[in-house]
Image (spheres, rainbow, N blue to C red):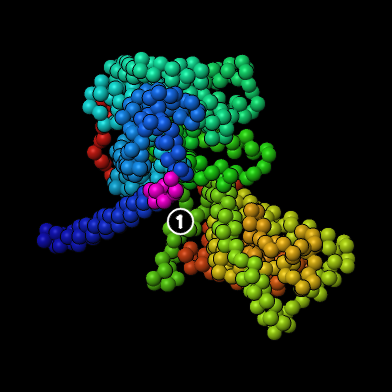
Amino acid sequence: MANAEHRERPAEASRAATVGDTGSRLRTVRLGLWLLAAVLAVRQVAAVLSTPRGERLTDLETWFGHDGVLQVSGSLYASTRFTGTPFGGLVLKPLTRSAEQALGWGWTFGTLLLVVALGLIVARALPRPVGRRTVTLAAPVAISLLMLSLPVRNTLWLGQTSVIPVLLVLLGCFVARGQRTGGILIGVAAALQPALLLFAPLLRFTGRRRAAAASGLTFATGTALAWAAMRRDSYTYWVHHRAGAGLGGRADDPANQSLHGALLRLGVEGPLEIGLFLLIGAAVVTLALRRAVRYARDGQLLLAVAITGCAAIVVSPASWQHQLLWVLLTVVGAVGRRASDRLVWPVAVVLVMTLPAAMILPNTAVLQPIRDNTVLLAALAAATAVPFLSRTSPYFRTPVPTRYAEPVPTRFRYVPLLPFLRRVLTRPNLLLELLLIRVTYAAYSKVRLAAAGSRERAEEHAHQILDLERLLHLDIEYAVNHAVVEIGGLRNFFDFYYTSFHFAVPLTVLGLLYWRRPVDYRWARASIGFTTLLALVGFWLYPLAPPRLMPNLGIIDTVYGVQDFSQPDYGTLTALTNQYAAMPSLHFGWSLWCGLVVALIAPRAWMKALGLLHPLFTAAAIVATGNHWVLDAVGGALVVVAGFGLTYLFQGPRARPAADAAVTGTGTVPEPRTPGEKPTDPVPVQEGPAWS
């Protein structure tokens, strides 16, 4: 017995040490996330308060009349800039112009505190059960996402009140004790934003009849008080503008992400538009409330609230950017059976709510209707179509795990392998990949544009490159360029090759890897990602004028035409792209990446040879067209080699061909669960408050 106890104690100590290490890591991560949330909060407040007066809190200024008191003698809606309800104007009557400066600071910091309170309530209201890691990190993550979201940034910038209705609804659903108190809070929110009256039937259908009655009565009382005190403004808001439609800007403006605004943007007007709005709106409300009631009874109360808020966005006559926060709350819903699919919906929502639509979708005429209605489509999908999992589903707690290759040791002691670059044996979710590739390229374009240097500095660097090439006897740009110009067919070939294959070939290689070689896809994607990142550093540190933008050099621009060097800013094209991003040449770098990937992976010798021809043709094209120096191609080759090296350093060697045996002919991996296997339970946590 003594020997048995002696053997068990080290095992218990080992388990305790492991738990202690995990807890220490969680505390460190939580501290880092709180610091991130604090930095984002300070950044948002500084951005607002550092802006000159007259350019910030512009919507807040509409509360004030000529005599300092809130529009006592005039109309709230005289300029149509005020978008709130008459009840909202009534409750802010005591504010005076003498307190405007203090109000600006107080309003900004007060809104910031409201956002923090909103994040804490969201973290507390997550659907149960949740693991210890989620409980520990939920609050700072929620606050950080709120700070980054466009609705909160817009609210802080304009001085709007749109955070208050969301906070009142969450307080009424998750914090208030007693149905009557919760109903009153939701009724006040509806009086400030009428579309939120949809929460009354949600309360009614989930068994909270007193709360539903209290919310409806509070809304009616607040609206009636506003009618009695501000009859003219109430008539203007409810009758003339049909519950706020047309206030704050044109109803067909892309900033109005309601169904009414979308129909107007599509060219539907008059009685047809009204009929379609009522018909589609009724269908959306019916489907959304049914889904919300189902998820509320399933125990996912926050998801039910978010779905109802999304329906309110759709059916409201006007849903401006600062009123769209409900879409972000839908990230709490679980979608997808596989772990690789679980992040698709949260990532899509976060991107839609934090980035402009131009960064998510390319600027093409075909996609213009989607770009103009990105948030509306997300709200519509969340309210009616997204298949959020029920808590009774075995995949809710534990999705089908992702298959990974065997782990490898790190290359160096103090350089750990990056967990997000683990060698995966299955292909990632296609929609998620397309989103990330598009957003990453949009960010790359913006950083590249921001890295543009002055013309004088770029030309000085070009003279340095030319002198070095002369020293190495590599200055062949003039001879090659003029030789190609003399042969029309060859010139047309290189012009076409330069303008057409730069994006087409890398995307084709990535697509084929995704389809045929999913084991190698992430390895190849990581290497081109590191290559592009290193190239951005080069653009920033060493702006370089290409040969075609060098005066008195005699290089003919075969692609863009004759140069006009009399223009002092010629060649910058700052509104389009950075013309001085020549070193290193990503035209050659990406083509070399394609050639090396094909040479390593292609099963036939002729395929490998064909792949290696692409960088050779690209090198000839960039020199012949006058767009790059020879040493630019050398720089492109260096960043490609460094990109593959960093991938090897942080990920290890690519999964060997033997790992492909784990992948079926369609590129999928069999689910690892046995038929009778049950998912493991997460760490139990204390239940949070429910409806009552």
The secondary structure that dominates the magenta segment is helix
Secondary structure under tag 1 reads helix
Can see residue 674? no
Q: Amino acid at mark 1?
A: Phe
Classify 265 as above or below 512. Answer: above
Residue name at image x 39 percent, y 19 percent: 230
Q: Residue furthest left?
A: 2
Q: Between residues 365 and 112, which one lies in front from this camera angle? A: 112
Tag count in the figure? 1
**Residue 484 magenta-drawn?**
no
Q: Residue 519, image x and y in percent?
A: 55, 56
10 Å crowding of disc 1: few (<14), some (14-19), many (20+): few
Residue occupying image coordinates x 40% and y 45%: 147
Quadrant in which residue 521 is drawn: bottom right
Q: Which residue is nearer to you in this view: 416 or 562? A: 562
| Depth check, front residue: 500 or 318 | 318
* Residue receiving disc 1: 420
Quadrant of residue 254 within the rendered picture: top right
Which quadrant of the figure has residue 179?
top left
| Residue 260 seen in render | yes
Tell me the quarter of the image containing the N terminus: bottom left
Picture residue at 72% right of the left edge, 62% below the top: 567
Task: Write the residue at 30% across / 37% down.
Answer: 121
Question: In screen coordinates, is 650 left or right of 466?
Answer: left
Q: State left or right for residue 98 relative to residue 272.
A: left
Q: Position of residue 108 (x, y in %)?
A: 36, 43
Query: What residue range appears in magenta?
Result: 44-53
Query: Residue 41: where, in percent of width, then height?
Result: 36, 49
Query: In the figure, 399 relative to 161: above or below?
Result: below
Image location (x, y in percent) of residue 476: 77, 76
